[in-house]
C-alpha cells in the first residue's frame, strides 16, 4: 500500500514538471540525439567516417609466416571402421572387429561409381561441370570395385594357391570333379563328418583317385546322347525385373544314395567349348515377330503397371512383355501407329518401382507438348529445357536430348534413380548437326538404365539395334510394324476452277500399289487445260523465299512457271470446295517456304470454314491466351492477323510465327477448330496431330545447297499426318500439279521408295574432348570406338585378332635368306616399292597434262611396263577415252611365238625385277622377234620418247584383229605392222632412246612435280647401286623376299586395324587436340587448364566464348552491348538486312571477327579442313541492333521495324541468347571476375521480358 502511494506521488510530480517544461522557449532539454539528425549528419559528412582517419587506417598487424601451413591437406576418409559383435543371447560385448569401409572417400569429384557420396542439393538435377560422370554401361572396367575390394582380392590371391588349395570333393561326397588340367593328378578327398567344437578345425582325409575314374567330357560329346540335357530344357520365364525364379531340385532318397558313384569328371577341355557359346555380333539384336498372336497376354502380364481403355496392338503387347522383363526395346513404326503407348508403359513401370524415367525429344517445342500430354496421364511429371525448369525432382522428366547429355557429363545424381530413358524420334540421329548427341547419350548411359527407342520405319533397325546392344553389353529387342492404323491414298490434283475443281486422280491405293491408270488420267487432264489457262507474267507474285527459276524448269511438281497470286487463289478455293464437298477437312497444306505460307493464307480473305459457334470458341480461347501478353504485344501485326485467320478456320505454322501463337494454332487444330493449316515440314516433327487430308504444295524443296525432290523419309513423315485413328477409314494425300505433272519415276521413288537408313553423324567436338579429358578413366578414343560409325569395324575385331595371331606364326616360320651378295635386298625391296608407287602416281598426272597430251599421237614411241618388264619399247596406236580411266592401245615387242601372261606378272616383285633390268638397256627378244597389240593404263607407260614413227595405226589394228580370228591366225603380218615391228627392233638395239623431260623441254615450274621427279631420280640411283642385282639367283631371292615382306606388311596393316589410329575420326581428334594445346586449353600431358575448365561450362561455341572472356572483350562493355554482340553466336539466318551499329558495337564486332579469325587460322595450321572464312562467317551480326534495343527496353512492336527478320526467329534467337549469357556468367564465376558476373546477370535480366519469354501454354 505504501509502495502504491509512493508511485502515485512520483507520477503526479513528473506530470507537473512536464507541464512546466512545455512553457520553456526550446522545450525540454534533449536526453538522446535525434535519430533523423544523426543519420543526416552521417550521410552529409563522409570525411568524419573512421576509414578516412589516417591514424586508424595505416595500422596493421604483423603475421608470422608459417610455410608448413601450405602442406596441410584435408584428411582422407577412414578406409576402415570398427564393428562391435555381441552375444546373441545375452547381448554382452563379445569382441570389436575392424572391417573395411566400402566406397570410402568416393565423391562426385573423384569416383565414377554409383556408390559415391551424393553431391550438394543444388547440383542434384543438372550436376556440375567439375563432377565426373557415372561409369558408362558396356565398358570393361567397373569403377564400383573400390581399392579396398581390390586389396581384399590381392590378399586372397596371396593366401590361396589354385593348384594345391582347390577342393575337388564337396562335403558328403566320396568323389568329385577335376577342374584342373588333364595332366595333373589330383587327389580325391573322402569326406568324414566328425562332431567338433566350434573353434576346432576339420580333419581332411585324402585318397588317391584311380585314373580310370577321370572322364573326358570332350569325348562324351561325340556320343549320341547328350549329358547336358538340362541345358536344353526350356528356360524359366523371367518375372519382374530380370529376376528369375530358381527351380528347386527334388531328389528321392534312392537318388541321394547314388551320388557316391559319381566319378571325377575332367572338364578342362569342355571349358574351351563353353567359351565359344558367347553372344555373336548378330546376337546383340533380336527381331521380334509381331505377327504371332498373344492370346495369353493377360497371363504373361497379370498385374500391368498401366492400362488403356482400348485394345492394344500386337507390337504394343510384345513391347510391354519385354518392358516387364526389364529389357531394352527398339520400336519402329509409322506415324500415329501408337508408339507413345510403349513410352507411357515404361513411365508407369518406373513409378510402380519407385524409380525415375526420362523422356527425350529432339526439339524444345515437342518437349513442351509432351509435358502437357503426360501431365494429364501421370501427375508427377517435370520439364527441363534450356530456360524452363518445372518440377525437376519428378519421377518422370521431359527434356531435350542435349539436356540429358549435359546431365550425364556433369554427373547428375538423378541418374542414380533412373530406370528408363525413352528416346523419341530416334531417326533424328541422321541430322548432320545434332545427330552426334544421340550417339553420345547412348554411349554414356550407365548399365542400370534401360533403353526404349521410338522411331519411324527405317530399313536398318537391326543394324542400329546391334550397335546399341554391343555398346551397352546386352541384347536389344527390335519390334517393327509396317502396318498403318489408317491406310493412305495418294492423289494428283489437276483442278483449277469450274468444272475441273474435282479432278483428283488416285496414283497409290490403300494397299500401297501404284496405279498407272490414274497417273495417265492426270496427264491427259493436265494437257487438256493447258490451252485454256493463260498464265500471268513469270515474275508475278515472286517475293523473298518464292521459287526461283530453277524450280520452274523442274517437272517434279515444284514448277510454278507462270504462276501468280490469282492462279494460287483460284486453285486453293477450288481445292477447298472440293475437299468440303467430299468431307475431307481438316487439311494440312505443307509449303516449303515461310513466306509462301503467309502469302497463301492472306489470299483466302473470302474463305470461311467454321460455324458461328466454332468462331465464338476460337475467339474466347484466343483472347484467353493473348491476355497473358503485355498490352502493346497484344496489338502486334502478327497477333491481329493470326486472330483474323483463326476466326475463319485458317492457321499458319512455321518457325517465323511467335511461339505462343504457334501453340494457340496447335491447340485449336487438335480441337478441330482449324480446318486449313498452312505449315512447313517442321510441323511434322511435333506430337501426333493428324488431319483428314494432307496437301503438298510442291514435292521439291531447297536443302541449303540446291533444289531437289523430297526424300522418301521426308515425304512419309509429312504424309503420315493424314488419317485420324478411330475417325477415318483412310487418309488422303494430295499433290498439287500447278504446272506439270511430276514424272512417274519420281513419284514412285518418293512414295514407295525405301526410307533413309540410320547412319552415324558422329564427330569429335571440342566439348566432347574437354569433358572427357577431365575424367581419368574415360578417353576420347573410347567414345570413338563405340560410335555407330565404328560398329562395323569393331564387330570384326575378333577375326582381326585371329588373323594377327596367324601372321605372327607365319613370321616366325619365315626362312632366313642365306646369301652374302643379297645383303641389301630388303633395302632394294623398300626402295623399289617406293619407286613404283611414285612412278605410277606421277605418270597418271603427267599424261593428263595438256603439254604431254599434245605429244601423245599415233606413232609416238613409248617405254612401257609389260609382262614383268619395265624396259619394253612400244608404239602408240590410239587412245580410248570412253571409260573413266584412259586406255592406250600400243604395239609392243615380245619374244618368240608370244609370251603367255603369267599369274606372277602383276605381282609387285615381278615389277621390281623389271626395274633392275632398266640399267641393262632396252628389252630385245632373245629368240624370234614377235609383237602384240595390247591395252595399257597410264601407270604402265614409263617414259615418252622423242621418237615419232610414221605408221598407219588403223591398218595395224585391223591387221591384228583379223589375225586373232582362228582361221587367220597363221597369216603373216601386214606391211604396215611389219614396218612398225622392224623399226621398234632397230630402236631396241640402240644404246638408248632420248626421252622427254618435262622440266627441261617445257620449263615446268610446278614445285610438286619437280619434287616428285627429283625423288624418283634419287630412288632410281639407289636401285641402280644395289649389289643384290648382281646375284645369279636374284630373281628367286627377290621372290622370297617379296613373300616375306608381304607378310610383314600385312602384319603391320593388321596391327594398324587393331590400333586406335585406324579409327575414322582419329585424325580429326588429334587435330582438335592440337588446337586446344595451341590455345592453352590443355597442356602437353592433356591436363585441363583454366581455359579448358571454363570451356566445359559452355553449351556451344566453346572456343570463341572462352577467348572473349579471357581477352576481356566483354568486361568493358555495358550489359545491353554484351547481349547484342553475343547474339552473333545464336543467330543463323543468312538473308537478313544489315544492322545500324553504334561505334562501340562496331568495334566489338571487329574484335569478335578478329578472334574468330585467329581460331580459324590455328585450326587450319593444326590440320583441320574448315576454311578460315567459313569459320568466321558462321557468326552473323544482323540481329545485333535488334537485341541491343530490346535489352535497353524498346517494345517488341518497335524493334520489328529495325529488321526484316520474322517475329518467331527473333524470339527464338533471344531465348537461345539467354542460355549463352548464363554460360558466360558461369565462366566469370570460375575465373573470379565479379564485374563480368554482375553484368551478365544484368544482361540476362534485361532481355527476359514480355512476349519473348512468355510462358508456354503447354506448361500452364
Image (cartoon, rainbow, N blue to C red):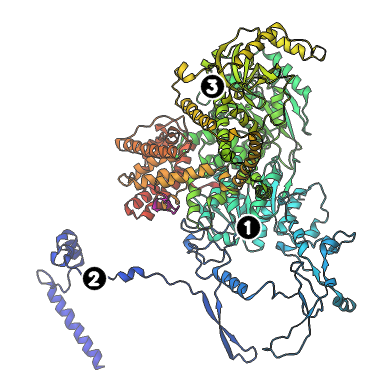
Observer-side mark, 2 or 1, equals 2
Tell me the CA gap for discs 2 and 1.
56 Å
| Residue at which label 2 appears | 63
Q: Earlier in the sequence, mark 2 or mark 1?
A: 2
Q: Nearer the viewer, residue 479 or 301?
A: 479
Do we see residue 293 in this rendering? yes
Left or right: where 1198 falls relative to 181 = left
Distance from the alpha carbon under mark 1 to that under mark 3: 60 Å
The span picked out in magenta is 1081-1092
Determine the main secondary structure of the stretch shown in magenta.
loop
Decide whether residue 1048 is among the magenta residues. Answer: no
State the residue in front, 307 or 973: 973
Asked whether residue 680 appears in the rendered view, the answer is no
* Labels 2 and 1 touching (C-beta < 8 A): no
> Residue 2: where, in percent of width, then height?
24, 93
| Residue 213 in which image quadrant | bottom right
Secondary structure at numbered mark 2: loop
Against 1102, is 908 above or below? above
Picture residue at 62% right of the left edge, 72% below the top:
157
Which residue is tagged 1? Answer: 449
Residues under labels 3 and 2: Cα distance?
Answer: 81 Å
Name the residue: 63% across, 43% down. Answer: 817
Q: Residue at position x 69%, y 7% from top?
A: 955
Q: Is residue 836 left or right of residue 957?
A: left
Vertical order, 574 against 1066 (above or below): above
Q: Position of residue 661 (x, y in %)?
A: 53, 40
* Residue at disc 1, secondary structure: loop
Mark 2 surroundings: few (<14), some (14-19) or many (≥20) residues within 10 A: few
Residue on which disc 3 sits: 846
| Residue 893: percent from left, percent from top | 67, 17
Amino acid at each position: 500500500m505504501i509502495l502504491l502511494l509512493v508511485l502515485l506521488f512520483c507520477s503526479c510530480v513528473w506530470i507537473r514538471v512536464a507541464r512546466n517544461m512545455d512553457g520553456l522557449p526550446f522545450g525540454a532539454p534533449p536526453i538522446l540525439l535525434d535519430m533523423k539528425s544523426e543519420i543526416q549528419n552521417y550521410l552529409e559528412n563522409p570525411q568524419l567516417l573512421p576509414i578516412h582517419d589516417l591514424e586508424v587506417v595505416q595500422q596493421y598487424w604483423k603475421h608470422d609466416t608459417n610455410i608448413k601451413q601450405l602442406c596441410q591437406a584435408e584428411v582422407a576418409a577412414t578406409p576402415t571402421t570398427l564393428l562391435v559383435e555381441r552375444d546373441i543371447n545375452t547381448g554382452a560385448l563379445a569382441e570389436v572387429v575392424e572391417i573395411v569401409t566400402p566406397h570410402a572417400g568416393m565423391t562426385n569429384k573423384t569416383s565414377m561409381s554409383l556408390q559415391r557420396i551424393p553431391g550438394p542439393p543444388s547440383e542434384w538435377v543438372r550436376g556440375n561441370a567439375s563432377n565426373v560422370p557415372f561409369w558408362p554401361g558396356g565398358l570393361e572396367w567397373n569403377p564400383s570395385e573400390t581399392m579396398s575390394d581390390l586389396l581384399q582380392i590381392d590378399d586372397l590371391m596371396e593366401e590361396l594357391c589354385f593348384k594345391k588349395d582347390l577342393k575337388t570333393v564337396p562335403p558328403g561326397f566320396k568323389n568329385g570333379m577335376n577342374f584342373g588340367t588333364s595332366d595333373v593328378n589330383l587327389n580325391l578327398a573322402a569326406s568324414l563328418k566328425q562332431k567338433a567344437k566350434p573353434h576346432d578345425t576339420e580333419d581332411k582325409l585324402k585318397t588317391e583317385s584311380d585314373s580310370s575314374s577321370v572322364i573326358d567330357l570332350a569325348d562324351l560329346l561325340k556320343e549320341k546322347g547328350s549329358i547336358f540335357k538340362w541345358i536344353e530344357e526350356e528356360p524359366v520365364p523371367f518375372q519382374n525385373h530380370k529376376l528369375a525364379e530358381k527351380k528347386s531340385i527334388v531328389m528321392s532318397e534312392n537318388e541321394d544314395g547314388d551320388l557316391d558313384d559319381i566319378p571325377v569328371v575332367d572338364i578342362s577341355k569342355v571349358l574351351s567349348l563353353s567359351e565359344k557359346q558367347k553372344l555373336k555380333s548378330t546376337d546383340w539384336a533380336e527381331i521380334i515377330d509381331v505377327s504371332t498372336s498373344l492370346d495369353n497376354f493377360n497371363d504373361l502380364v497379370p498385374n500391368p503397371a498401366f492400362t488403356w481403355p482400348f485394345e492394344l496392338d500386337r507390337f504394343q503387347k510384345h513391347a510391354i512383355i519385354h518392358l516387364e522383363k526389364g529389357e531394352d526395346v527398339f520400336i519402329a513404326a509409322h506415324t500415329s501407329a501408337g508408339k507413345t503407348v510403349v513410352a507411357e508403359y515404361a513411365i508407369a513401370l518406373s513409378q510402380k518401382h519407385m524409380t525415375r524415367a526420362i523422356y527425350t525429344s529432339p526439339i524444345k517445342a515437342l518437349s513442351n507438348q509432351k509435358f502437357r500430354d503426360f501431365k494429364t496421364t501421370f501427375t508427377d511429371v517435370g520439364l527441363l529445357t534450356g530456360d524452363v525448369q518445372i518440377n525437376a525432382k519428378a519421377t518422370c522428366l521431359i527434356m531435350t536430348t542435349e539436356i540429358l547429355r549435359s546431365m550425364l557429363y556433369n554427373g547428375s545424381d538423378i541418374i542414380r534413380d533412373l530406370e528408363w530413358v525413352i528416346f523419341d524420334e530416334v531417326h533424328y540421329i541422321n541430322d548432320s548437326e545434332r545427330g552426334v548427341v544421340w550417339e553420345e547419350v547412348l554411349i554414356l548411359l550407365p548399365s542400370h538404365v534401360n533403353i526404349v527407342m521410338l522411331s519411324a520405319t527405317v530399313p536398318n533397325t537391326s543394324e542400329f539395334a546391334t550397335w546399341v546392344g554391343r555398346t551397352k553389353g546386352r541384347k536389344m529387342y527390335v519390334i517393327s510394324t509396317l502396318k498403318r492404323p489408317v491406310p493412305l491414298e495418294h492423289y494428283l490434283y489437276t483442278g483449277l476452277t469450274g468444272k475441273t475443281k474435282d479432278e483428283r486422280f488416285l496414283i497409290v491405293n490403300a494397299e500401297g500399289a501404284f496405279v498407272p491408270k490414274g497417273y495417265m488420267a492426270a496427264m491427259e487432264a493436265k494437257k487438256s487445260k493447258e490451252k485454256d489457262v493463260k498464265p500471268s507474267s513469270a515474275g508475278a507474285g515472286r517475293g523473298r523465299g518464292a521459287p526461283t527459276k530453277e524450280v520452274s524448269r523442274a517437272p517434279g511438281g515444284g514448277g510454278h512457271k507462270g504462276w501468280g497470286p490469282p492462279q494460287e487463289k483460284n486453285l486453293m478455293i477450288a481445292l477447298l470446295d472440293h475437299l468440303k464437298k467430299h468431307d475431307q477437312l481438316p487439311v494440312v497444306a505443307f509449303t516449303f517456304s515461310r513466306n509462301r505460307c503467309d502469302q497463301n493464307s492472306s489470299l483466302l480473305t473470302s474463305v470461311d470454314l467454321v460455324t458461328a459457334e466454332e468462331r465464338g470458341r476460337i475467339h474466347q480461347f484466343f483472347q484467353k491466351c493473348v491476355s497473358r501478353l503485355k498490352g502493346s504485344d497484344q496489338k502486334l501485326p502478327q497477333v491481329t492477323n493470326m486472330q483474323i485467320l483463326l476466326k475463319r478456320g485458317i492457321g499458319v505454322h512455321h518457325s517465323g510465327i511467335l511461339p505462343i501463337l504457334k501453340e494457340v494454332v496447335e491447340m485449336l487444330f487438335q480441337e478441330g477448330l482449324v480446318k486449313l493449316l498452312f505449315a512447313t515440314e517442321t510441323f511434322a516433327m511435333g506430337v501426333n496431330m493428324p488431319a483428314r487430308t494432307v496437301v503438298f504444295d510442291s514435292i521439291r524443296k531447297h536443302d541449303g545447297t540446291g533444289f531437289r525432290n523430297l526424300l522418301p523419309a521426308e515425304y512419309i513423315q509429312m504424309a503420315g499426318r493424314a488419317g485420324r485413328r478411330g475417325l477415318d477409314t483412310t487418309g488422303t494425300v494430295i499433290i498439287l500439279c500447278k504446272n506439270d505433272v511430276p514424272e512417274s519415276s519420281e513419284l514412285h521413288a518418293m512414295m514407295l521408295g525405301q526410307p533413309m537408313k540410320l547412319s552415324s553423324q558422329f564427330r569429335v567436338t571440342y566439348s566432347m574432348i574437354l569433358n572427357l579429358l577431365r575424367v581419368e578413366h574415360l578417353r576420347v578414343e573410347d567414345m570413338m570406338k563405340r560410335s555407330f560409325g565404328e560398329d562395323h569395324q569393331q564387330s570384326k575385331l575378333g577375326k582381326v585378332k585371329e588373323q594377327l595371331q596367324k601372321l605372327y606364326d607365319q613370321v616366325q616360320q619365315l626362312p632366313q635368306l642365306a646369301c652374302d651378295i643379297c645383303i641389301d635386298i630388303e633395302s632394294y625391296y623398300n626402295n623399289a616399292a617406293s619407286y613404283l608407287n611414285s612412278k605410277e602416281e606421277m605418270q597418271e598426272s603427267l599424261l593428263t597434262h595438256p603439254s604431254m597430251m599434245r605429244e601423245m599421237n599415233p606413232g609416238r614411241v613409248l617405254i612401257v611396263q609389260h609382262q614383268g618388264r619395265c624396259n619394253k619399247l612400244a608404239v602408240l596406236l590410239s587412245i580410248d577415252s570412253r571409260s573413266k580411266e584412259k586406255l592406250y592401245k600400243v604395239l609392243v615387242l615380245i619374244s618368240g611365238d608370244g609370251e603367255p601372261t603369267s599369274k606372277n606378272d602383276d605381282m609387285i616383285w615381278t615389277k621390281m625385277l623389271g626395274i633392275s633390268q632398266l640399267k641393262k638397256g632396252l628389252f630385245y627378244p632373245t629368240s624370234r622377234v614377235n609383237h602384240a597389240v595390247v591395252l595399257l593404263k597410264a601407270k604402265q607407260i614409263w617414259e615418252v620418247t622423242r621418237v615419232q614413227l610414221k605408221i598407219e595405226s588403223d591398218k595395224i589394228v585391223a591387221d591384228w584383229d583379223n589375225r586373232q580370228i582362228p582361221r587367220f591366225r597363221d597369216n603373216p603380218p601386214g606391211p604396215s605392222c611389219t614396218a612398225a615391228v622392224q623399226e621398234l627392233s632397230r630402236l631396241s638395239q640402240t644404246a638408248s632412246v632420248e626421252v622427254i623431260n618435262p622440266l627441261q623441254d617445257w620449263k615446268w615450274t610446278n614445285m610438286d612435280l619437280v619434287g616428285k621427279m627429283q625423288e624418283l631420280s634419287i630412288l632410281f640411283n639407289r636401285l641402280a647401286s644395289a649389289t643384290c642385282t648382281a646375284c645369279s639367283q636374284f630373281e628367286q631371292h627377290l621372290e622370297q623376299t617379296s613373300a616375306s615382306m608381304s607378310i610383314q606388311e600385312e602384319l603391320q596393316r593388321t596391327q594398324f586395324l587393331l590400333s586406335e589410329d585406324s579409327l575414322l575420326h582419329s585424325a580429326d581428334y588429334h587435330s582438335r587436340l592440337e588446337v586446344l594445346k595451341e590455345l592453352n586449353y590443355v597442356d602437353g600431358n592433356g591436363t585441363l587448364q583454366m581455359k579448358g575448365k571454363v570451356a566445359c561450362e559452355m553449351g556451344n561455341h566453346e572456343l570463341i566464348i572462352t577467348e572473349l572472356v579471357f581477352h576481356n572483350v566483354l568486361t568493358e562493355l555495358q550489359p545491353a552491348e554484351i547481349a547484342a554482340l553475343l547474339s552473333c553466336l545464336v543467330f543463323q539466318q543468312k538473308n537478313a538486312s544489315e544492322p545500324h551499329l553504334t561505334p562501340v558495337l562496331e568495334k566489338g564486332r571487329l574484335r569478335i571477327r578478329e578472334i574468330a579469325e585467329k581460331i580459324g587460322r590455328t585450326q587450319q595450321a593444326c590440320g583441320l579442313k574448315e576454311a578460315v572464312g567459313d569459320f568466321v562467317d558462321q557468326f552473323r551480326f544482323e540481329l545485333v541492333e535488334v537485341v541491343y534495343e530490346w535489352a535497353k527496353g524498346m517494345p517488341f512492336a518497335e524493334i520489328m521495324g529495325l529488321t526484316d527478320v520474322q517475329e518467331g526467329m527473333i524470339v527464338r534467337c533471344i531465348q537461345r541468347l539467354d542460355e549463352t549469357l548464363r554460360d558466360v556468367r558461369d565462366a566469370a564465376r570460375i575465373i573470379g571476375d565479379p564485374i563480368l558476373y554482375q553484368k551478365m546477370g544484368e544482361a540476362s535480366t534485361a532481355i527476359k521480358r514480355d512476349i519473348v519469354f512468355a510462358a508456354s501454354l503447354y506448361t500452364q
